[in-house]
Image (tube, grey):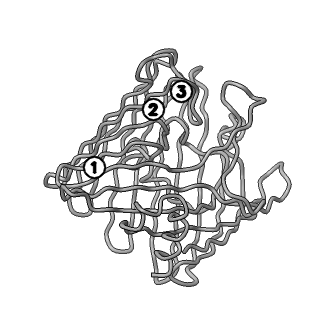
Amino acid sequence: MKKSLIALAVAGALTAPMVAQADATLYGSLRVQATDADGADLHIGDNTSRIGIKATSELYSGVTAIAHFETYVSTETGSLDSTYVDVNDSDAVKSKGRLAYVGATGDFGTVTVGRQWIPAYLWTVAKTDIMAAANTETTHNYGTGARQGNTAAYVTPSFGGFQAAAAIVARNSNGVDAQDTDDNVDATHLAAQYNMGNFAVALSTLQYKGTVDENINSLGLSYSAGDVYVGLSVEDDEVNRTGDDSIVVLAGSYTMGNTTLLGSYTDFRDDVAGADQGKRYIAEVQQKLGKQAFVFANYIEASSDAETAGEATDTFAIGYNVSF
């Protein structure tokens, strides 16, 4: 109740007549992490902290309007938002948030427009992206294959466990995630998933047009039963890893009361020249301190090939997350 009242007060300063009739919720998560990586100094910093507002409003037609805004919060600077370097101008530093979209949902499915997560990530690669620790050597490019601005998407309702999704990305100038491809539509996206009891499988293709003219194709499998979870993802990212083999990730977790044990194995496979890119092994333990707070310890072991290729580095990290 308190969060809803705060959210209404914040949003009301901008659009009081509209939000007064909406159900809005303020939420957030402050996350700090201490990281000790081979060849680098100890770093105590932010771990993708964020704050956001979700809102819904009933339309006259019976359809539900939805709105979602989320941006970064830095525990290092105490400020909102974050910065990034323009992919086409290394001297240009700009601001980038996380989510900002509106849409509608009902018996017909869900339509969303704006900066949002797309099924290319949510239905496939996210099945193995389960660690709390953040590291710079991720296996997935979030800017081109996960969160996208300038996007319109449609997700069908579930038909006996089956869902499909379609999206387009259209920008007439360089965006915060990727460059303008000089095509009318910069990327098209199709995905499908099927859930049957504890098992789920999904396929996705994200096809960039114009000057990029490459695809990101992915497969995701998962099994969840009580305290046990196992996920597998295979991603062929021709946009960011041209000519390299698909990256394969196997991850799982087991929960015992307030303690969760997590592990993952990544095979970076071969690059375009046929050189082995190595393996990465991650172990993490999370300890809940309350309903919305936990601490974690994470260790990454990289093979010599992975270190040589710049894919992974031996790293130890501890962190503390508090959500509201």
Lateral position of residue 162 relative to residue 319, left or right: left
Q: Secondary structure at mark 3?
A: loop
* Observer-nearest of 267 and 31: 31
| Residue named by callout 1 | 110
Mark 3 to mark 2 CA distance (whole Å): 8 Å
Distance Cα–Cα, label 1 vs label 3: 35 Å
Left or right? Give the position of 50 relative to 189: right
Residue 244 tag number? 3
Mark 3 or mark 2: which comes first in sequence? 2
Q: Which mark is residue 236?
A: 2
Nearer the N terminus, badge 1 or badge 3? 1
Q: At x 69% / y 39%, what residue is drawn?
A: 94
Looking at the image, which residue is at 39% across and 42% down?
113
Query: Quadrant of the rendered structure where residue 58 is?
Result: bottom left
Q: CA distance from mark 2 to mark 1?
A: 27 Å
**Image point (55%, 29%), residue name:** 270
Give residue 4's position: percent from left, percent from top.
46, 75
- Residue type pointed to by label 3: Asp
